[in-house]
Image (cartoon, rainbow, N blue to C red):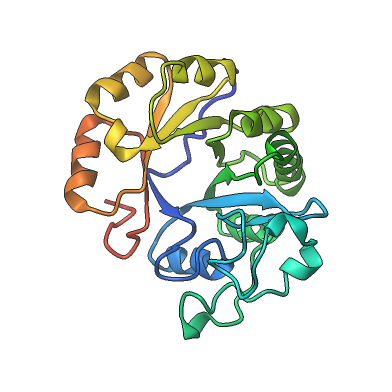
Amino acid sequence: MDAHPWPWSLPFWIAHRGAGKLAPENTLAAFREGARHGYRAFECDVKLSADGVPFLLHDTTLDRTTTTRGRAADLPWAALSRLDAGRWHSRAYAGEPPASLEAIAAFVRVNQHALNIEVKPTPGDEFITGQVVGREVMRLWKDSGPMSLLFSSFAPEALRGARDTAPEVPRALLLDKLPADWLDTVQALGCRAVVTHYALMDQPQVEQLHQLGLKALVYTVNDAATAQWLITNGVDGIITDAVDRFSPTA
């Protein structure tokens, strides 16, 4: 494993896609809404435009969260930046544009927030997406001192790419199931954490990760009873949509 320390300033409660239910997910509006509710750590999805600009979007296509259709990776950032990424959510956010990683970096840096960047590559672009995102993170945070950052991805190749250009930023493997070789993958990537679907993270799983020096985080928890069960099990972080129901200082 890498010797780089865990970002201890990463808060326990992490707002999913900004405040991605109360405002259009993965936009600056969602980050502002999460911050308004007291959140100081955010998760977002980052992929590349056709001309290699990292920006925020969960899906491979633009169909669900913008006013256009098709693969996001087929458009340059100049075109993507003019899309309406808010109208799908509600009329109040009509005209809200997609967010670039650079814009999000400016927001979290000036407010001293922490950021979990999920590298969400377009299929086939896993390694290069990780490389570019890692390179951009090192550029955008170069003068900010200690970085409260975490890379995560379901795609091991994306994490390999991020390790190539930003080896000092801690990495976490995202898992929605536990294949037989998951731990081998975690260790081969030099990960410092594992982020699983919350149903996978029981107390024995948390203890196993802690014994290996790994942090145990979970997504996406929106129910108070489930959150309490996970806290009792000793998890190190919870990603939630319910920023209006969970106090990040509790």
Q: Residue furthest front?
A: 70
The picture places residue 75, in percent across and down from the top left corner, at 77, 62
Q: Name the quarter where the N terminus is drawn.
A: top right
The image position of residue 109, as x and y in percent, is 62, 54
Please tell me whether residue 138 is drawn above or below residue 191 in the rendered image: below
Count of number-bearing discs: 0
Residue 73 image offset from top left, x and y in percent: 72, 54
Q: Residue at x 80, y 61 (%)?
A: 76
Give percent across and percent down for residue 176: 40, 36
Image check: 114 left or right of 230? right
Question: Residue at point 68% right, 56% down?
Answer: 55
Furthest toward the right, the residue is 51
Question: For the point 19% across and 34% down, which residue is it?
Answer: 232
In the visual, does 247 lie left or right of 120? Answer: left
Relative depth, front residue between 186 and 36: 186
Relative placement, left or right, of 211 versus 147 is left
Instruction: Give the quadrant of residue 191.
Output: top right
Corner quadrant of residue 59: bottom right
